[in-house]
Amino acid sequence: MTFYGFAKSVVYGIFKPWYRVEAIGVENFPKEGGVLLCSNHINNFDPIIVGIMAPRPVHYMAKEEIFRVPVLGGIVRKCNAFPVKRGFGDREALRSGLKILKEGNVFGLFPEGTRSKTGQLGKGLSGAGFFALRTDALVVPCAVIGPYKAFHKLRVVYGKPIAMEEMRKNKASAEQVTELIMSEIAKLIKEHQ
């Protein structure tokens, strides 16, 4: 068993019963090939919850400061995360994200770029559209719904993959693609709240 698999099973055993986490739409998750998994962001635990409920290992960008923390930095790296410098275009992080998708893996992204202070879905940044347009990865919208309160139900909903062929053919901008992704996330939230 890999470190990721071990860590996932341990964390799953803690978080699933504590937050009564339920995954909906797992059948929508592609079994192979690159997947850009785009979710809303309501809590600092979102990457963990989305990651443990996903049927495949998920890679994430994480702020570079985390990687400087002794022990934690090593654990985060072994759990498929890579550093990103926030506040300006980090070309190395963009290349890492594209490589993950082109190698047929799952790359998890929170298009809002930061956690929502209100719990409401915010505006997505163009990064999601950038990754969607530059690879053949399937884009899977995801919604985390419910309060992060002990023994209250928390849902992770996976929507159907969003076809990007039309957007690429019409030379859509990264912003337009991100808007489409955000609208699909909004539909999942509305439908399952």
Image (cartoon, grey):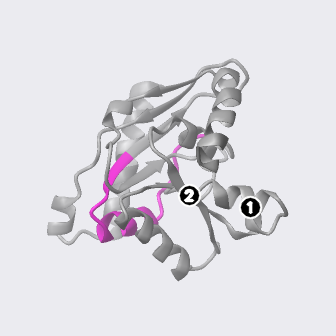
Q: Which mark is residue 13?
A: none
Q: Position of residue 46 (x, y in %)?
A: 61, 43
Could you tell me the amino acid type at mark 1? Gly
Q: Which residues are magenta?
A: 119-140
Give the farthest residue toward the front. 1
- In this view, the residue in front, 90 or 145, is 90
In the image, residue 90 above or below residue 45 = below
Could you tell me the amino acid type at mark 2? Tyr
- Give the SS element for disc 1: helix
- Give the SS element for disc 2: strand
Q: Quadrant of residue 30?
A: top left
Q: Position of residue 69 (x, y in %)?
A: 83, 64
Q: Which mark is residue 60?
A: 2
**Residue at x 67% of width, y 27% of height:** 13
Question: Can residue 148 be seen in the rendering of this structure?
Answer: no
Which residue carries the number 1 mark? 74
Q: Is residue 132 left or right of residue 154?
A: left
